[in-house]
């Protein structure tokens, strides 16, 4: 019996449609809905729900009602029978019944707006007709049109797409805080479109729509002189809905005008030059136009897909005040933001007309106090502001570029204001999911460095670095880091969008495969560990999010990838052109790391095949799963035959080789223990330091913990000397370095030009912070955190560690502390989930929760002791366990 009892404290919150809060481009008529349940009650779970849809919150008419459905599902719920109309606004809400049959109140309304759903794109593509040369930093273009609104407009939506990046304006006001819209796809095959509700920006009578167009990643020169095209263009339209039911469209076409303006030079790598003397504050207001405005060129409609943007946009997220300012020998003012960051600065100055004020950006300083720019290579990374003069203070921020920096050099100002420089942190607006801290301040700084590295390199897509003439979506970096990334931030839609570019990079044939970068701009295809990102990233994103669409969209091309590798591996050993290998392993030049490339390629061949099997099983493709299971067995046998000796030793006898074999489950069970000992020896001969590059490093700590050597994993991560994670921390790093020795006190900067101080790849160790130190691990049998594990492992001299994770169901907390033989842990399990807890104690009798022994605790089920650990299952709630440790448990 289900009752309506609104006295229950349960609340329904966190409403999402298609994985997004209040989405404005839902592209399916039958979307999926998700929600969370807030409850202070132990054991809280959902037994039924009811979902309803309206046109607006106060509407009497209910457009769709699910009725009461008995179900525990609260994530990605398919509203069976619902059919939404294209380009329409809706609101929805939900209520749930708990395990006692009592109903919550209705949730607050959440909005959704549908997109085109495959409908026509009714606007022309327009440009200024100018060809942008390779290496050129052209001016930005300003487009505009006037239109009249004859009656009251009840809804107006602006849609635009571009080969380039756009800032939209209406009647003199910028109507969005989004940056770099509509984003960066693989322009060879698709463009994104976005939409904005602009009803409140319009007025009865004459209105003006203005669009600023920048080259961005399309016609701006990228690494290796790459351009997708030489003439940026845009297409836009406003759909106006009136009270009488009529609809009017205002679209780009031959009647539009364009001119240049104050942004006289710009480019992603170049920077931006803004001449304030050319500002026209009324450029997007209704008025008579002068001769500066010229007729646009109407371009041919491009033969690409126009897709709704899925990911959250790039935005200004926070601001940083300088820690200090010093004047160097050349007279330049050097500002220290205290944190290596990505974005730009806001300049505040008082100057004479024509004063040329220059800002240069750098991650590090030279010994003489000047900025270090050698690692920028050809990127100018410079912002110039030419003052308009007058009595007013001038304030400026760049628009169509960004920088990676900690230090800012300011010249052209005699005596700057105390607040002349403010750092503006810019990245994709992803919600923070995870938090971690422990009793070791160096590990806390390493965690912070990784988080800031993710912020700076999650700008539109997962880039390798944010500062030099590169900033590309390297697939190898992305796949090794994606598990950590999804612990830190809610990035499933971010990855889902980027994976379209990964699929677009795929080419068949012996020289094909997924690209090393996506969107594709050149470089090799099919490189082991990089191309395999096309399989690893969607599988990992599925595990964290539970979004089945990620599997469905990527499974076909993952199968193509496995089949392509099979063609190049007739005897199970993948023979292919050389790739990046164990990139930047310490002590070796680039591309000369000791792990044989064919070994890496074969190991990843097996791993991608295993992922294809898992995907196939989840999607009900059982014949394909069976086929690939046979293939996987053949690849494992070949790997074992080729690389593993009778005593479990691998030919190259170094860390990454053992980590691949153990981490990807390629070793025979009877040789596993011997191989573990070889791995331990390979680490010990390096004085408990790592000797791994991009491929081996993410595996070292998780593999050591999985084979019972968490004590050694702690030793490795706590090394403060080269090569190790804390070496950079001890040397002042605030983000993750590209190289283990990007800078040393003895040698200074690494002599190679490839030397980023903001590369997240080595920050992949943070997944081990969450999964092992705090012990929060997902259960792959229940993707999306419906069921999970908490199993902290003590060590490293830590006296406490705490982590929280805001999952789709709610917050998970694991917070422990140890004092002598006393161990305590606070656990929080979200409503509608269950958790398997494992504690580092050997006896059930040694554990209690608020005085109640586990054996009689009402919330404990499946109590067991295994391998010197106590394990049990718990339902939702907050718990505080106390235990007595035995000496053997303390490392």
Image: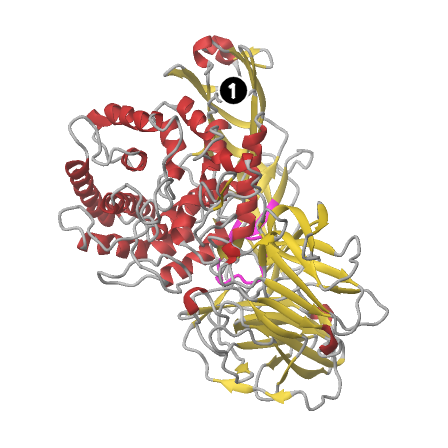
| 211 in relation to 642, above or below | below
Foreground of the two, 591 or 812: 591
Which picture quadrant has residue 673? Answer: top left
Which quarter of the rendered picture does the N terminus lie within? top right
Which picture quadrant has residue 700? Answer: top left
Foreground of the two, 414 or 312: 414
Coloring basis for residues:
secondary structure
For the point 62% across and 59% down, which residue is it? Answer: 360
Asked whether residue 148 is drawn in magenta, I would say no
Which quarter of the rendered picture does the C terminus lie within? top left
Residue 703 seen anywhere in this rendered image of the structure? yes
Whole-percent x and y of residue 455? 56, 49
Left or right relative to 46: residue 420:
right
Q: Secondary structure at mark 1?
A: loop
Give the residues in magenta.
14-33
For the point 52% across and 20% down, which residue is it? Answer: 797
**Count of all numbered marks drawn on residues in the image:** 1
Residue 53 seen anywhere in this rendered image of the structure? no
Foreground of the two, 67 or 421: 421
Q: Residue furthest front?
A: 329
Left or right relative to 310: residue 531:
left
| 812 in relation to 495, above or below | above
Q: Residue furthest bottom?
A: 291
């Amino acid at each position: 019996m289900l009752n309506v009892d609104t006295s229950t404290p349960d609340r329904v919150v966190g409403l999402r449609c298609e994985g997004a809060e209040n989405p404005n481009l839902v592209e399916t008529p039958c979307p999926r809905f998700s929600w969370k349940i807030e409850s202070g009650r132990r054991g809280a779970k959902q037994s039924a729900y009811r979902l309803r849809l309206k046109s607006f919150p106060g509407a009497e008419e209910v457009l769709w009602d699910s009725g009461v459905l008995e179900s525990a599902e609260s994530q990605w719920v398919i509203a069976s029978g619902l059919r939404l109309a294209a380009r329409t606004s809706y609101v929805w809400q939900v209520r749930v019944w708990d395990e006692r049959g009592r109903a919550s109140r209705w949730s607050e309304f959440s909005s959704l707006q549908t997109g085109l759903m495959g409908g026509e794109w009714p606007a022309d593509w327009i440009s200024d007709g100018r060809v942008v040369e390779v290496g050129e930093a052209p001016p930005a273009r300003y487009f505009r049109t006037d239109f009249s609104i004859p009656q009251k407009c009840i809804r107006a939506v602006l849609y635009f797409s571009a080969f380039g990046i756009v800032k939209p304006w209406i009647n003199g006001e910028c109507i969005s805080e989004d940056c770099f819209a509509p984003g960066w796809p693989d322009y060879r095959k698709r463009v994104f479109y976005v939409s904005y509700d602009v009803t409140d920006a319009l007025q009865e009578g004459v209105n003006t729509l203005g669009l600023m167009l920048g080259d961005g990643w399309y016609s701006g020169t990228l690494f290796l002189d790459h351009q997708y095209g030489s003439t940026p263009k845009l297409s836009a339209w406003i759909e106006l809905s009136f009270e009488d039911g009529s609809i009017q469209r205002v679209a780009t076409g031959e009647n539009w005008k364009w001119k240049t303006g104050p942004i006289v030079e710009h480019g992603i790598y170049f920077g931006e030059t803004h001449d304030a003397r050319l500002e026209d504050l009324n450029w997007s207001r209704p008025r008579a136009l002068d001769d500066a405005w010229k007729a646009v060129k109407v371009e041919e409609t491009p033969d690409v897909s126009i897709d709704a943007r899925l990911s959250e946009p790039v935005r200004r997220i926070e601001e940083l005040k300088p820690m200090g300012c010093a004047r160097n020998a050349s007279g330049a003012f050097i500002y220290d933001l205290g944190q290596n960051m990505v974005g730009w600065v806001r300049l505040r100055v008082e100057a004479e007309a024509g004063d040329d004020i220059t800002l240069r950006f750098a991650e590090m300083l030279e010994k003489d106090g000047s900025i270090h720019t050698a690692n920028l290579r050809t990127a100018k990374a410079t912002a110039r502001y030419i003052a308009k003069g007058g009595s007013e203070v001038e304030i400026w921020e760049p628009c169509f570029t960004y920088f990676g920096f900690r230090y800012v050099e300011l010249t052209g100002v005699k005596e700057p204001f105390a607040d002349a420089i403010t750092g503006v942190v810019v990245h994709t607006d992803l919600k923070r999911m995870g938090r971690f801290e422990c009793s070791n301040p160096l590990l806390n700084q390493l965690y912070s460095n990784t988080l800031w590295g993710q912020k700076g390199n999650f700008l539109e897509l997962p880039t390798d670095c944010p500062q030099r003439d590169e900033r590309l979506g390297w697939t190898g970096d992305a796949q090794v880091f994606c598990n950590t990334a999804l612990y830190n931030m809610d990035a499933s839609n971010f990855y889902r969008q980027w994976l379209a570019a990964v699929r677009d990079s795929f080419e068949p044939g012996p020289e094909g495969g997924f690209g090393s970068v996506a969107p594709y701009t050149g470089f090799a295809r099919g490189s082991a560990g990089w191309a395999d990102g096309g399989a690893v990233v969607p599988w990992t994103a599925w595990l964290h999010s539970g979004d089945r669409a990620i599997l469905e969209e990527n499974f076909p091309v993952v199968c193509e990838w496995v089949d392509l590798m099979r063609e190049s591996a007739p005897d199970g050993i993948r023979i292919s052109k050389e790739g990046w290998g164990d990139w930047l392993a310490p002590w070796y030049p680039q591309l000369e790391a000791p792990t044989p490339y064919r070994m890496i390629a074969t190991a990843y061949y097996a791993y991608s095949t295993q992922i294809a099997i898992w995907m196939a099983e989840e999607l009900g493709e059982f014949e394909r799963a069976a086929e690939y299971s046979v293939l996987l067995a053949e690849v494992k046998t070949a790997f074992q035959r080729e690389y593993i000796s009778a005593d479990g030793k691998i030919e190259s006898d170094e860390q990454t080789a053992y980590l691949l074999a153990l981490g990807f489950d390629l070793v025979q069970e009877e040789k596993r223990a011997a191989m573990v000992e070889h791995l331990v020896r390979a680490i010990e001969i390096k004085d408990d330091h790592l000797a791994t590059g991009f491929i081996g490093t993410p595996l070292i700590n998780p593999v050591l913990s999985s084979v019972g050597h968490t004590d050694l994993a702690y030793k490795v991560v706590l090394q403060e000397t080269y090569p190790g994670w804390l070496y950079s921390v001890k040397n002042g790093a605030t983000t993750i370095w590209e190289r283990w020795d990007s800078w040393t006190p003895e040698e200074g900067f690494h002599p190679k030009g490839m030397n980023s101080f903001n590369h997240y790849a080595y920050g992949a160790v943070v997944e081990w912070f969450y999964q092992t130190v705090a012990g929060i691990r997902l259960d792959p049998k229940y993707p999306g955190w419906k069921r999970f594990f908490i199993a902290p492992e003590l060590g490293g001299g830590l006296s406490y560690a705490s982590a929280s994770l805001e999952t789709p169901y709610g917050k998970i907390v694991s917070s422990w502390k140890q004092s002598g033989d006393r161990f305590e842990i606070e656990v929080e399990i979200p409503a509608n989930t269950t958790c398997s807890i494992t504690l580092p104690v050997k006896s059930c009798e040694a554990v209690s929760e608020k005085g109640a022994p586990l054996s009689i605790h009402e919330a404990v089920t499946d109590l067991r002791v295994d391998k010197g650990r106590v394990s049990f299952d718990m339902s939702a709630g907050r718990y505080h366990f106390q235990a007595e440790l035995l000496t053997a448990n303390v490392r």
